[in-house]
Amino acid sequence: MNKSFNEKIYSELKKVPKGKVTTYKALAKKIGTKAYRAVGRAMRNNPYAPKVPCHRCVSSDGRIGGFSGKLSPNSREVKKKIRMLRNEGIKIKGDKVVDFERVNA
């Protein structure tokens, strides 16, 4: 039985350890696609959170990106994503991950 796109993404995301992040682009590449926006949709529709840690997925330039379907850095949802990342030891300044290359899984 073939896994759905979302299930493949969730499977890869579960491999990202606490204290690390990955990107929408990296997750897409791992399953052999360039459907980066579809990865974002999979994160938004993640029914397995926090077991599948969608808060660990950020933009390729280290920006936090959206969370729970919200994109504004001032939204309650994105602020929650930032808190979750900080609780795992990820440093954030403004809307970007500090030392992105070091914490990028």
Image: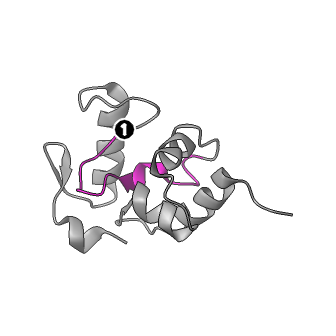
Q: x, y (%) of residue 88?
A: 34, 59
Q: x, y (%) of residue 51?
A: 58, 54
The N terminus, quarter of image: bottom right
Q: Is residue 4 left or right of residue 59?
A: right
The residue shown at (26%, 59%) is 90
Q: Is residue 16 left or right of residue 80?
A: right
What's drawn in magenta, residue-wise? Answer: 49-66
Q: x, y (%) of residue 47?
A: 64, 41
Q: Is residue 52 magenta?
A: yes
In this view, the residue in front, 3 or 89, is 3
The residue shown at (57%, 45%) is 42
Structure colour scheme: one colour
Q: How many marks?
A: 1
Q: Residues within 10 Å of mark 1 (few under 14, many from 20)?
A: many
For the residue marked with disc 1, what is the amino acid? Gly
Report helix, strand or loop for mark 1.
Answer: loop
Q: Residue furthest front?
A: 34
The residue shown at (30%, 43%) is 83
Q: x, y (%) of residue 57?
A: 40, 54
- Which residue, given by chain and number where applicable, does mark 1 sit on? 66
